[in-house]
Image (cartoon, rainbow, N blue to C red):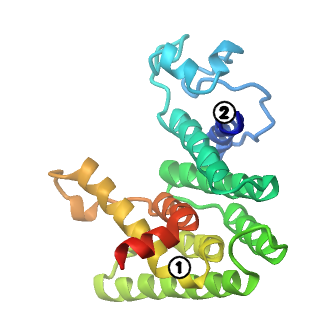
């Protein structure tokens, strides 16, 4: 019952996350307009068209009014949020920690969806996330201590900045955006400095698998820009839950 509740909460929040991401940069806010709408024809969605995941499946991924394709990040955000809610519930029986993890996961999902759409990681998300993680670690609500989180944020951010600077010096092009570096304030704090290497490894593997699965054989692959924020987010969340297991496996 606990996991079913977590899954339902995750689905509902995921629907909200997708709205937040879709309205970024449009001039709209998360509250105005008050109802969700098709981004192509502005058709306001009915209650039945707003059911997370189910409405997407029943409508076969298309708007019921204009038949245009519904952007895939909508169901992806909902599915990811549901999965994270269940995994976080399996990780801890403490409702406070679970609640904090849902907030952290939500920020990661919204930031990742925006990065996929616009190649931008908004400062207000990354900085807010960093404050929340550091505050939660200080209050003892996370598995990482405050000092470990503080060092993780500092060392992680500096390390990613150094990698970006070296890459640009060698290739004369940006390999990582400044948004990715700022994102490390939050994500490095979440995993702590002890697990930074595992975190970067997992994030890199996620990015590599994505590239092989989607870009293999495409012309000009070396010049295609890929947002790294979603892989950093995935790497940090996986490391937070399973970092010790991964370390034990690699040994």
Instruction: Please state the horizontal and vertical placement of residue 203, each as a whole percent of the image.
Output: 43, 66
Q: Residues within 10 Å of mark 2 (few under 14, many from 20)?
A: few
155 versus 35 height, above or below: below
At horizontal 35% and vertical 65% (from top left) the residue drawn is: 205
The image shows residue 102 at horizontal and vertical percentages of: 70, 51
The secondary element bearing badge 2 is classed as helix
Can you tell which of label 2 and label 1 is closer to the viewer? Answer: 2
Task: Name the residue furthest top.
Answer: 65
Cβ atoms under marks 2 and 1 closer than 8 Å: no
Give the residue number, with chain letter if any, for mark 2.
Answer: 4
Q: Quarter of the image containing the C terminus? A: bottom left
Residue at 60%, 74% in the rendered image: 191
Residue under pointer 1: 195
> Splitting the image into 4 quarters, where does residue 54 fall?
top right
- Which residue occupies the foreground of this view, 27 or 232? 232
Q: Earlier in the sequence, mark 2 or mark 1?
A: 2
- In the image, residue 55 above or below residue 71: above
**What residue is at 67 percent from the left and 17 percent from the top?**
45
Which of 67 and 206 lies nearest the eye of the viewer? 206
């Amino acid at each position: 019952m606990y996991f079913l509740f977590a899954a339902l909460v995750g689905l509902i929040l995921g629907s909200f996350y997708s709205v937040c991401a879709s309205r970024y940069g449009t001039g709209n806010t998360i509250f105005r307009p008050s109802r969700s709408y098709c981004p192509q024809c502005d058709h306001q969605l009915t209650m039945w068209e707003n059911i997370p995941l189910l409405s997407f499946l029943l409508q076969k991924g298309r708007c019921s009014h204009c038949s245009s394709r519904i952007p895939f990040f909508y169901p992806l955000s909902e599915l990811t949020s549901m999965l994270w809610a269940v995994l976080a519930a399996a990780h801890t029986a403490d409702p406070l920690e679970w609640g904090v993890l849902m907030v952290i996961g939500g920020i990661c999902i919204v930031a990742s969806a925006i990065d996929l759409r616009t190649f931008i990681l908004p400062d207000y998300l990354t900085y807010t996330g960093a404050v929340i993680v550091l505050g939660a670690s200080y209050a003892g609500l996370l598995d990482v201590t405050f000092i470990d989180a503080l060092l993780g944020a500092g060392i992680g951010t500096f390390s990613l900045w150094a990698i970006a600077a070296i890459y640009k010096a060698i290739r004369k092009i940006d390999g990582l955006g400044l948004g990715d570096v700022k994102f490390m304030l939050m994500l490095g704090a979440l995993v702590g400095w002890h697990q930074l290497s595992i975190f970067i490894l997992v994030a890199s593997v996620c990015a590599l698998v994505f590239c092989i699965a989607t870009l293999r054989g495409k012309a000009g692959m070396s010049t295609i820009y890929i947002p790294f924020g979603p892989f950093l987010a995935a790497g940090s969340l996986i490391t937070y839950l399973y970092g010790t297991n991964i370390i034990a496996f690699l040994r």
